[in-house]
Image: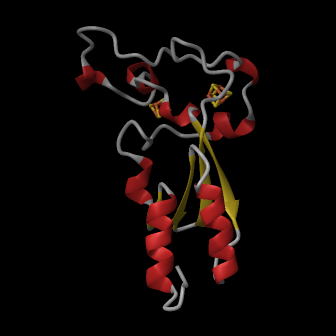
Amino acid sequence: MTKTIPIHADTSRIDPENKCDFCTGSKCCTYITQQIATPRSKADFELLLWQVSHRNIRAYQDEDGWFLLIDNPCDHLQPDGRCGIYDTRPAICREYSNDYCEFDAPAEDGFKRYFPDYDTLLAYCRKRFRKWGY
Ligand code: SF4
Ligand code: SF4
């Protein structure tokens, strides 16, 4: 997988077999997600506010539930966009389909709610809880 667009590349010939070759930045190898319990109480959201206050930590909700999104490139991602352990890469990487991925549209497009930072989540908390307090 070379994931940089070659100069003069003909992007009209992208198919699932060669798609990753055209993907600049290898987005799918630059973050992890972790499902969390659905936050319901003020205490739950206070915890989430603390979490998203940290650099590169975001939160979102999609059709599968609530998740933390940790933006951090994989140690095995090579400067040329290739996987350094391709033959022994973890199962989740093997099972990941590029049929419709971040190359096609930002992941955020599929989020029901998206909290990229503290301010966004605090605004949501103030709306959701009439007596948020601050
Ligand atoms: S699976 Fe998608 S996001 Fe990941 S490297 Fe391939 S084209 Fe890029
Ligand atoms: S192990 Fe390889 S395929 Fe999996 S996230 Fe890391 S660089 Fe990407």
Q: How many marks?
A: 0
State the residue lying farthest toward the bottom: 130
For the point 33% across and 10% down, the residue is 6
The percent coordinates of residue 79 (x first, y second) are 54, 12
In terms of depth relative to the viewer, which is nearer, 100 or 72? 72
For the point 50% across and 67% down, the residue is 121
In terms of depth relative to the viewer, which is nearer, 21 or 125? 125
In terms of depth relative to the viewer, which is nearer, 11 or 26? 26
The percent coordinates of residue 66 (x first, y second) are 60, 66
**Residue 49, image quadrant:** bottom right
In terms of depth relative to the viewer, which is nearer, 98 or 117? 117
**112 horizontally vs 38: left or right:** left
The percent coordinates of residue 91 (x first, y second) are 73, 37
**116 horizontally vs 67: left or right:** left
For the point 59% across and 39% down, the residue is 31
**27 horizontally vs 69: left or right:** left
Is 103 drawn above or below residue 4 in the view shown? below
